[in-house]
């Protein structure tokens, strides 16, 4: 037996990460679940007491402050201690990013157990989900937001998943490239990129040279100028607006960078594209496609 307060959120859902169910249970001695499957990810966090958890042929004795992950369609079993049965909260979740987030945090079938000292915050996150339990977009967003907080509290106490040096280097480059792709329109600098991926600038320089054959600064400038070339061809925006749209607050600095890369001014480039010279236009388009393809085809 167990005294459980739980909620199942019905209906078809989609998105990167969303709540399927959540709850809080105070179990009786030797209360158990399984062996059985779950259709989605589910994380239990132990607030008090003890018990054991089995998955993937291994059994883990657990107590207050620990938690465990059950992956979708994986046979699992867990049981409360006979003398000190546990009380726990749980959250079931799905989404297109769920698997990626679990890997990034470091949780998997081979490493399903974690420890966290954020007991109060984890409990409050689940409690908030349960308090906002009715139908409606506001409560859906509230619960999914609390799920993100719940996972972030767990991630704080977990080391990154074990990776070799090459994997870590590739991850840094991929995340740096993603940051540039999402922020090139802002006045970011290479130091901002390095700070985002939590490494120093000199190491980031080495990684970019090894992976892409260029420095982070050159990559950032090339990406911005490539986007500017697109805007010069397909829009009638002013040079100043294009400069700002590509992260340059000073049009003169933008023009200097553009000239350095294309050996002509932005206005001259636009005029040349408007001449209808098919061959040159095709060559420039091929250059754009080549660079964009180089970024999109980075595999790690």
Image: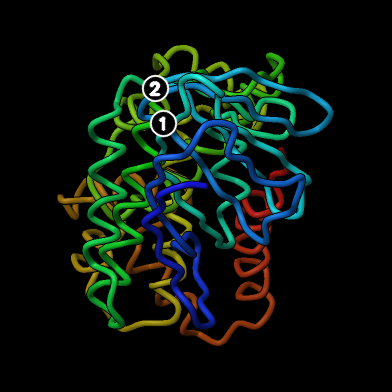
Q: Is residue 89 above or below residue 234?
A: above
Residue 270 horizontal/vertical position (percent): 40, 74
Q: Residue at (39%, 73%) from the top-left corner?
A: 232
Q: Residue at (71%, 37%) from the top-left corner?
A: 300
Which residue is most to the bottom?
A: 276
Q: Is residue 288 left or right of 20 when viewed as pictured?
A: right
- Depth check: give the residue in front, 174 or 60: 60
Q: Is residue 15 left or right of 77 when viewed as pictured?
A: left
Residue 124 lies in quadrant? top left
Q: Secondary structure at mark 2?
A: loop
Q: Is residue 167 left or right of 100 when viewed as pictured?
A: right
Q: Residue at (46%, 21%) from the top-left corner?
A: 84
Q: Earlier in the sequence, mark 1 or mark 2?
A: 2
Colour convention: rainbow
Q: Residue at (77%, 45%) from the top-left corner?
A: 35
Look at mark 1 in the image and give the residue it sits on: 154
Residue 47 lies in quadrant? top left
Q: Is residue 10 above or below residue 249?
A: below
Mark 1 and mark 2 in contact? Answer it, CB < 8 Å: yes
Q: Secondary structure at mark 1?
A: helix
Q: Is residue 30 above or below residue 234?
A: above
Q: Which mark is residue 42?
A: none
Look at mark 2 in the image and give the residue it sits on: 116
Q: Residues within 10 Å of mark 1 (few under 14, many from 20)?
A: many
Q: How many marks?
A: 2
- Depth check: give the residue in front, 231 or 2: 2
> What separation in Å lies between label 1 and label 2 (alpha carbons)?
6 Å
């Amino acid at each position: 037996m167990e005294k459980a307060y739980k909620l199942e959120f019905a209906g078809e859902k989609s998105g990167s990460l969303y709540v399927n169910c959540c709850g809080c249970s105070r179990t009786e001695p030797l209360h158990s679940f399984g062996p059985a499957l779950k259709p989605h990810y589910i994380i239990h966090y132990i607030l008090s007491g003890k018990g054991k958890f089995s998955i993937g042929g291994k059994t883990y004795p657990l107590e207050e402050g620990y938690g465990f992950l059950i992956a979708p369609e994986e046979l699992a079993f867990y049981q409360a201690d006979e003398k000190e049965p546990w009380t726990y909260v749980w959250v079931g979740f799905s989404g297109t990013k769920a698997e990626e987030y679990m890997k990034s945090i470091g949780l998997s079938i081979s490493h399903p157990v974690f420890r966290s000292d954020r007991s109060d915050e984890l409990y409050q996150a689940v409690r908030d989900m349960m308090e906002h339990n009715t139908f409606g977009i506001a409560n859906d967003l509230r619960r999914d937001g609390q799920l993100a907080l719940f996972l972030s509290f767990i991630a704080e106490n977990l080391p990154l998943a074990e990776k070799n040096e090459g994997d870590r280097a590739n991850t840094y480059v991929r995340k740096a490239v993603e940051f540039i792709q999402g922020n090139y329109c802002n006045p970011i600098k290479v130091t901002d990129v390095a700070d985002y991926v939590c490494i120093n600038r000199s190491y980031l320089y080495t990684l970019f040279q090894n992976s892409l054959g260029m420095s982070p600064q050159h990559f950032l400038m090339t990406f911005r100028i490539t986007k500017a070339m697109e805007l010069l061809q397909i829009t009638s925006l002013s040079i100043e607006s294009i400069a700002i749209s590509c992260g340059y607050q000073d049009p003169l600095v933008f023009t200097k960078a553009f000239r350095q890369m294309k050996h002509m001014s932005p206005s001259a480039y636009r005029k040349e594209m408007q001449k209808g010279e098919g061959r040159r236009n095709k060559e420039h388009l091929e250059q754009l496609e080549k660079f964009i393809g180089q970024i999109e085809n980075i595999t790690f």
